[in-house]
Image (cartoon, grey):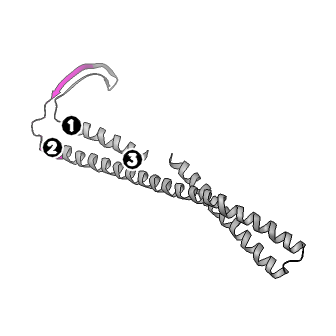
Amino acid sequence: MQQEQSLAIAMKRKQSALSGFFPHVHVGYFSQQIDGVDGFSGWSAGVAIPIFQTSQYSQLKQEKIRLEQEQNRLTQTRFSLKRTIDNALVQLHQLNNELIAMQENDLEQATIMINTLQSQLKHEEINFAAFVRGMELAYKLKMQYLQTLNEYNQLTISLERYL
């Protein structure tokens, strides 16, 4: 937004520099009072025709360069923003695929593992140390899913800022 305003300002400055090549016409009215005496009034009119325009050429050239610089900055910012958004979309797609795979495989396995371990512990088919190791593994799978989901959500939130 700020760069678009800078570009608009640069365009106006170029137009102003360009106006120095053309004649200027002015008309005016004045009314004065000198030492308490009224009645000093009149009209003035004039035409200004630029004769030596070398300074105008250099000023116009300078404003053209400024305009090009602002256009380049705006183009660079837009390109950078587009690249950032494209990268975020690719990463979002990858995270989405990971989440789908985790939902279909890891979460289901973790739930089965937890139920099996609880059943084995209840029927005393497994010792407590093996139960704890198995539960730790099952909850690590669930935790990995939650971390990936958090990363996906954070990326979605940051992407909304750009769109």
Q: Earlier in the sequence, mark 1 or mark 2?
A: 1
Looking at the image, is 77 positioned above or below residue 33?
A: below
Q: Please provide percent x and percent y for residue 161.
A: 54, 49
Q: Which residue is mark 3?
A: 3
> Do labels 1 and 3 touch, CB within 8 Å?
no
Q: Earlier in the sequence, mark 2 or mark 3?
A: 3
Q: Tell me the magenta residue range.
A: 41-58
Q: Nearer the viewer, residue 33 or 148?
A: 148
Residue 110 lies in quadrant: bottom right
Q: Earlier in the sequence, mark 1 or mark 3?
A: 3
As for residue 60 lying within the magenta part, the answer is: no
Looking at the image, is 156 positioned above or below residue 47?
A: below
What residue lies at 47% left-to-right and 52% top-to-bottom? 85
Residue 128 vs residue 38: left or right? Answer: right
The mark found on residue 115 in the picture is none
- The kind of residue on which mark 2 rests is Tyr
- Check disc 1 and report its element: helix, strand or loop: helix
For label 3, the crowd category at 10 Å Cα-Cα, with few meaning under 14, some 14 to 19 and many 20 or more, is: some
Q: Nearer the viewer, residue 32 or 60?
A: 60
Q: Which residue is mark 2?
A: 57
The mark found on residue 18 in the picture is 1
- The kind of residue on which mark 1 rests is Leu
Find the distance from the CA under tag 1 to the CA under tag 3: 23 Å
What residue lies at 37% left-to-right and 51% top-to-bottom? 79
For label 1, the crowd category at 10 Å Cα-Cα, with few meaning under 14, some 14 to 19 and many 20 or more, is: some
